[in-house]
Image: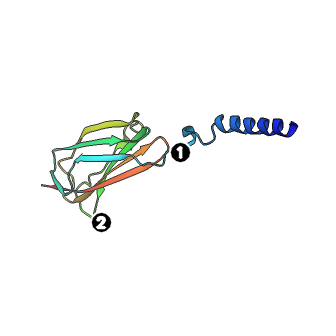
């Protein structure tokens, strides 16, 4: 009879330990899903006239929480010209643009200088979530006269 009593106590205790605590719960799961980026503009292969505005539009989302985005534009070819090379990096603004929540509609304009080098460029947007997962989307664009 004592054996049955101890066996029931052990089983009851094991049952309680498996129900409590944080082991195995949803709180322990690490976010491994990268954010999604639906880049509307610029379009792949878009031509932008120097001295005009490049519109940037994208829908950003994450399954847990977004953190920040970085937009860069750099020359896509290596050529030496005497005119000004156009560069853009959103990190040059006052601090990194931070965002929060599960979704964010990104929309802003970039002024392309009149004297920007007429060349192919690579437009890149990098979006990260709170756990550091990143998604990078690149588009080829060309600045023309």
Task: Determine the residue located farthest toward the front in the rendered image.
Answer: 1
Q: Nearer the viewer, mark 2 or mark 1?
A: 1
Q: Secondary structure at mark 2?
A: loop
Q: Residue at x 32, y 47 (%)?
A: 37
Q: Position of residue 110 (x, y in %)?
A: 24, 42
Mark 2 and mark 1: Cα distance apart in space = 41 Å
> Is residue 96 or residue 98 the one in the foreground?
98
Q: Quadrant of residue 12?
A: top right
51 left or right of 57?
Answer: left
Q: Residue at x 35, y 37 (%)?
A: 103
| Mark 2 residue crowding within 10 angstroms, few (<14) / some (14–19) / many (20+) | few
Which residue is denoted by mark 2 in the rendering? 78
The disc, 2 or 1, on the residue closer to the chain's N-terminal end is 1
Q: Quadrant of residue 59?
A: top left
Q: Position of residue 64 (x, y in %)?
A: 44, 39
Which residue is denoted by mark 1 in the rendering? 30
Q: Is residue 76 above or below residue 20?
A: below
Q: Secondary structure at mark 1?
A: loop
Q: Position of residue 24 (x, y in %)?
A: 60, 42
Q: Is residue 42 above or below residue 106?
A: below
Q: Quadrant of residue 107?
A: top left
> Is residue 95 or residue 14 the one in the foreground?
14
């Amino acid at each position: 009879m004592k054996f049955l009593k101890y066996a029931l106590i052990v089983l009851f205790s094991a049952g309680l330990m498996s129900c409590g605590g944080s082991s195995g719960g949803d709180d322990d799961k690490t976010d491994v899903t990268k954010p999604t980026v639906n880049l509307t503009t610029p379009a792949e292969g878009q031509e932008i006239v120097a001295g005009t505005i490049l519109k940037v539009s994208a829908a950003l989302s994450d399954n847990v929480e977004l953190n920040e985005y970085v937009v860069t534009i750099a020359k896509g070819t290596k050529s030496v010209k005497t005119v000004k090379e156009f560069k853009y990096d959103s990190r040059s603004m006052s601090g990194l643009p931070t965002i929060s929540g599960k979704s964010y509609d990104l929309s802003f304009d970039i002024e392309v200088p009149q004297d920007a080098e007429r060349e192919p460029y690579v437009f890149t947007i990098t979006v990260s979530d709170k756990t550091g997962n990143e998604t990078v989307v690149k588009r080829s664009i060309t600045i023309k006269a």
